[in-house]
């Protein structure tokens, strides 16, 4: 099982400054690269102060320019918000500029607040996403593409420059049956049980495994990535403090994910969670290194290929860097991942 750091920019205080937030994310990416993490993941979200990244392909290029080998995953690019004729060309350029270290994760959007204000309501985004994805694949695969659909209608054109080779595509999907069908279509899969239990995780992995097996040799390189809030704590008091920070973070996340979407000048209002603090703790991977190895073992045994660690939920940057380093030294080697190297 490989490990990935999710550079999920969190901006709870405007006085901190966007420049400083993204400098922190770059510092995390550089450290992950030196320590032997397989990848970093970047989100796409607009108009809000969590998961704050309105320019994921640009950021992917910046990350690649300051690292040597680490893969960069968009987790995810929201296709309904883009014109595929423009996005396809930007994607090809980003693939070139990242030295072909890019994996494109795609999704239809998750937060009603931003989707509504950008003119693609969630209730319509599935249909537009499906057409956008089909068109994007055709534009990357073929020259002289014409299209006559509901959301796109144009005569023959060719995306330039042409791709140097296939760009890996990863689908964000949570429902097991959806995972199965997307796997059968040849996509890499990214999922998360969110507040689900161990049984839900196993159902998600099982759906991927079933689809991959049915693909035979064509599915040999397909991977399953699973995302969780993950952080190393020094002791029980430190663990409790970080759980409280994550609980506050999820008060904002819930507001725009399943809640009313109360946002003031870009800042999401933290709302009381339906979950208690103890229930939040059960759904997070926040613990000591020894406990972390035990918690991660079922994921590796189930067949998860890549574990994506969300480490940005309000913790100070110095502590985030320490956790990334300690995880590389004490946890990753237990799962056959790349061992830590010098940070000098």
Image (tube, rainbow, N blue to C red):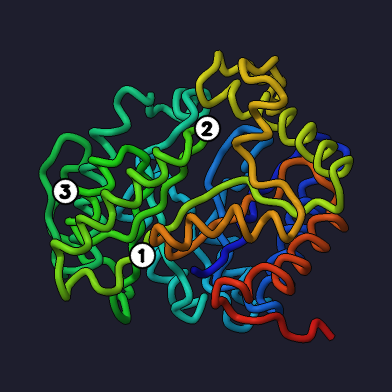
Q: Nearer the viewer, mark 3 or mark 1?
A: 1
The residue pinned by badge 3 equals: 154
Q: Residue at x 53, y 67 (%)?
A: 72
Are the residues tagged 1 and 2 within 8 Å (C-beta)?
no
- For the residue pair 280 and 163, the one nearer the viewer reads as 280
Residue 65 in picture, x, y percent from top left: 63, 77
- What kind of element bears circle 3? strand
Identify the image quadrant of residue 241.
top right
State the CA–CA distance, disc 3 to disc 1.
35 Å
Q: Is residue 280 left or right of residue 210?
A: right
Residue under the point 83% across and 35% down: 13
- Is residue 30 visible to us here? no
Q: Is residue 228 visible?
A: yes
* Label whose residue precedes the other's in the sequence (2 or 3): 3
Residue drawn 72% across the image and 60% down it: 290
Distance Cα–Cα, label 2 vs label 3: 43 Å
Residue wearing tag 1: 223
Residue 92 relative to residue 268: left or right: left
Pick whichever, 23 or 315, lies toward us.
315
Closer to the eye: label 2 or 3: 2
Q: Is residue 185 above or below residue 229?
A: below
Q: Quadrant of the C terminus?
A: bottom right
Residue 37 x/y as whole percent: 61, 72
Q: Nearer the viewer, residue 343 or 2?
A: 2
Q: On the rendered structure, is 226 left or right of 157?
A: right
Looking at the image, which residue is at 16% across and 48% down?
154
For label 3, count other residues whose C-alpha is less than 10 Å away and answer few (under 14), some (14-19) or many (20+). few
Marks 1 and 2, the one that precedes in the sequence: 2
Question: Could you say where residue 153 lies in the image, as x and y percent from the top left?
Answer: 16, 43
* Label 2 sits on residue: 195
């Amino acid at each position: 099982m490989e490990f990935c750091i999710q550079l999920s920019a969190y901006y709870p205080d405007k006085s901190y400054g966007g420049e400083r937030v993204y400098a922190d994310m770059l510092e995390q990416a550089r450290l992950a690269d030196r320590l032997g993490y397989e990848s970093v993941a970047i989100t796409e979200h607009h108009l809000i102060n969590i998961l704050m990244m309105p320019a994921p392909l640009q950021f992917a290029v910046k990350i690649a320019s300051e690292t040597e080998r680490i893969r960069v995953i968009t987790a995810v690019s929201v296709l309904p918000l883009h014109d595929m004729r423009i996005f396809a060309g930007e994607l090809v350029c980003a693939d070139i500029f990242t030295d072909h270290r890019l994996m494109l994760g795609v999704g239809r959007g998750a937060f009603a607040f931003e989707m509504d204000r950008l003119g693609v309501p969630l209730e319509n985004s599935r249909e537009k996403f499906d057409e956008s994805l089909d068109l994007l694949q055709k534009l990357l695969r073929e020259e002289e593409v014409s299209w006559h659909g509901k959301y796109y209608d144009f005569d023959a054109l060719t995306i330039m420059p042409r791709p140097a080779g296939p760009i890996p595509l990863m689908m964000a999907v949570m429902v097991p049956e959806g995972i199965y069908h997307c796997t059968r279509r040849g996509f890499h899969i990214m999922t998360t049980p969110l507040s689900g239990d161990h049984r839900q995780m196993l159902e998600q992995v099982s759906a991927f495994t079933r689809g991959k097996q049915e693909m035979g040799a064509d599915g040999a390189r397909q991977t399953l990535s699973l995302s969780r809030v993950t952080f190393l704590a020094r002791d029980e008091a430190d663990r409790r403090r970080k759980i409280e920070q994550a609980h506050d973070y999820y008060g904002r996340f819930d507001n725009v994910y399943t809640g009313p979407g109360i946002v003031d000048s870009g800042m999401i209002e933290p709302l009381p969670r339906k979950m208690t603090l103890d229930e939040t703790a059960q759904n997070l991977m926040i613990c000591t290194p020894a406990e972390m190895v035990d918690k991660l073992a079922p994921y590796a045994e189930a067949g998860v290929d890549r574990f994506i660690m969300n480490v940005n939920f309000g913790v100070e940057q110095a502590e985030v860097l320490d956790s990334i380093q300690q995880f590389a030294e004490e946890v990753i080697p237990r799962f056959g991942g790349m061992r830590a190297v010098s940070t000098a």
